Image: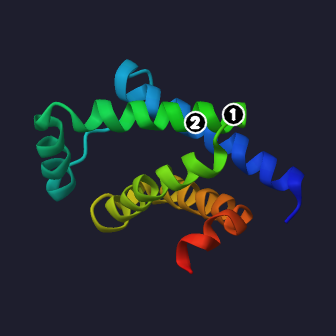
Amino acid sequence: MNSKFTMIVRIALGIMLVVFGSNKFLHFLPMDAPTGAAGEFMNSLGATGYIFPIVGLLEVFIGLMLLLKKWVPFVIILLAPISINILLFHLFLAIPGVAIAFLVAIFNGILIYKHWRLYRPLFI
């Protein structure tokens, strides 16, 4: 895989994570409140008081590490369950945001594929 391509993917994913992770704290992007089952799910997660701050903090941390090219193999594996949950939430509960969710999951998958030689020993 072309290293310039993976650099662009890494930087784009890092920017998305920093922006959307920061938005969980600073609320600078206008977001429509989800309705129906998606709204109930988000309200129950928000009621815990810790899920959104922790996920936001993780997203900002992972995004910064991707932008700084530090610990990339570690942070893309750390991002895997987050990106899967983002994708599943949008597929099953809030279809309008599915494009960004697919982008995050695909970019994460590309970076995992690029670093697969480092993960191979985990599956032997």
Secondary-structure class at tag 2: helix
Q: Quadrant of residue 114?
A: bottom right
Labelled disc at residue 2 = none
In this orientation, does residue 30 appear? no
Which is nearer the eye, 112 or 53?
A: 112
Farthest residue toward the bottom? Answer: 124
Q: Which amino acid does label 2 sit on?
A: Gly
Q: In which quarter of the image is residue 113?
A: bottom right
Alpha carbon of mark 2 to alpha carbon of mark 1: how far? Answer: 6 Å
In this orientation, does residue 119 appear? yes
Q: What residue is shown at x 32% (from left), y 59% (from top)?
A: 89
Q: Which residue position holds label 2?
A: 63
Q: Which amino acid does label 1 sit on?
A: Leu
Q: Looking at the image, do the residues carrying marks 2 and 1 touch, with CB atoms under 8 Å apart? A: yes
Q: What residue is shown at x 12% (from left), y 37% (from top)?
A: 48
Q: Residues within 10 Å of mark 2 (few under 14, many from 20)?
A: many
Q: Position of residue 109 (x, y in %)?
A: 61, 64
Q: Position of residue 46 (x, y in %)?
A: 17, 37
Q: What residue is shown at x 32% (from left), y 58% (from top)?
A: 94
Secondary-structure class at tag 1: helix
